[in-house]
Amino acid sequence: MSSVEREFVLTLVLQVEKAERPGQTDALETAARAVLAILADERSVGDGDWAAAMRDWQDARIRKVVRRARGAEWRRASTLPGITVTGTTAVVRVFPPVPLDEVPKDLAKLQVTGTDLEDPEPPDEPEPGTPVLWVNPHLEMSTGKTMAQVGHAAHLAWLDLPTRARETWQSADFPVAVRTATATQWSALLRSSLPVVQDAGFTEVEPGSCTVIADHPALRGREY
């Protein structure tokens, strides 16, 4: 089987300690920033250590799996090659993609399902000019599922952006907001030309469901 025919998976691990749980929105935004961080990392391009795996992964279905860890599990996971991204309350480590049957055991054994978080307060309005990943208001998704979906949306935005906009975003440490759209906003976004994540439907939602839309100012033709 060729590398392109093999299915690759990128793993994101959210730190969720027993007594300290991150906020929902911060976890989503940190996951999106983690995906962007590994896409932009020098090890992911050219002759970098992760470049071949990144190419093989992106040549097929860009599968992402979100897991959670605490205590010793988190410490073991943190020793594996990857990038740790810290939000206000959330910490996410992203790992370079590997074939689905070669996920390191210290990641493969981590919990996937059942990650559901809450926001202590409703999130503020995004700052003007901040890229926003809009979540479909008509779907029910767990925190872990939504983290993967906003990661996909950030990924699609990155692929669509011109080089200068990518560099500007990266130099600012990838500011991004994740918000649930209103029904009216969602209808308007679907009519736009912005990148839309359509889920394969393996978990939680129906195949072909539109889950998240990436709204970056540069993708609307505005200066960023």
Image (spheres, grey):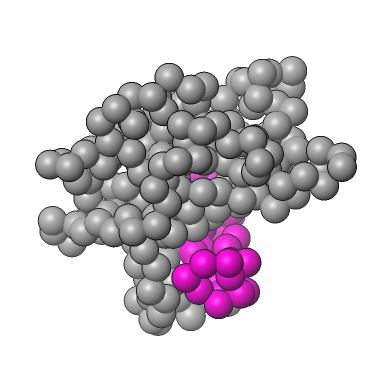
Q: Is residue 210 above or below residue 21?
A: below
The percent coordinates of residue 136 (x first, y second) are: 43, 72
Number of numbered tags placed on the structure image: 0
Over which residues does the magenta segment extend?
A: 195-224
Using the rendered image of the protein, determine whether residue 173 is visible from the camera's viewpoint: no
The residue lying toward the viewer, choosing from 40 and 217, is 40
The residue lying toward the viewer, choosing from 166 and 142, is 142
Q: Quadrant of residue 146?
A: bottom left
Q: Is residue 165 above or below residue 45?
A: below
Q: Which residue lies at the image location 22% right of the left edge and 50% below the top edge?
A: 23
Q: Quadrant of residue 70?
A: top left
Q: Which residue lies at the image location 48% right of the left edge and 53% below the top edge?
A: 148
The residue lying toward the viewer, choosing from 36 and 208, is 208
The percent coordinates of residue 217 (x first, y second) are: 50, 52
Quadrant of the rendering where the N terminus is positioned:
top right
The percent coordinates of residue 222 (x first, y second) are: 53, 52
Q: Quadrant of residue 158?
A: top right
Q: Is residue 136 above or below residue 104?
A: below
**Residue found at the far right of this picture:** 1
Q: Is residue 132 left or right of residue 154?
A: left
Using the rendered image of the protein, determine whether residue 88 is visible from the camera's viewpoint: yes
Q: Which residue lies at the image location 46% right of the left edge and 26% below the top edge?
A: 83
Q: Is residue 193 magenta?
A: no
The residue lying toward the viewer, choosing from 201 and 128, is 201
The percent coordinates of residue 14 (x first, y second) are: 35, 41
Q: Is residue 213 magenta?
A: yes
Q: Which residue lies at the image location 37% right of the left edge and 37% below the top edge?
A: 92
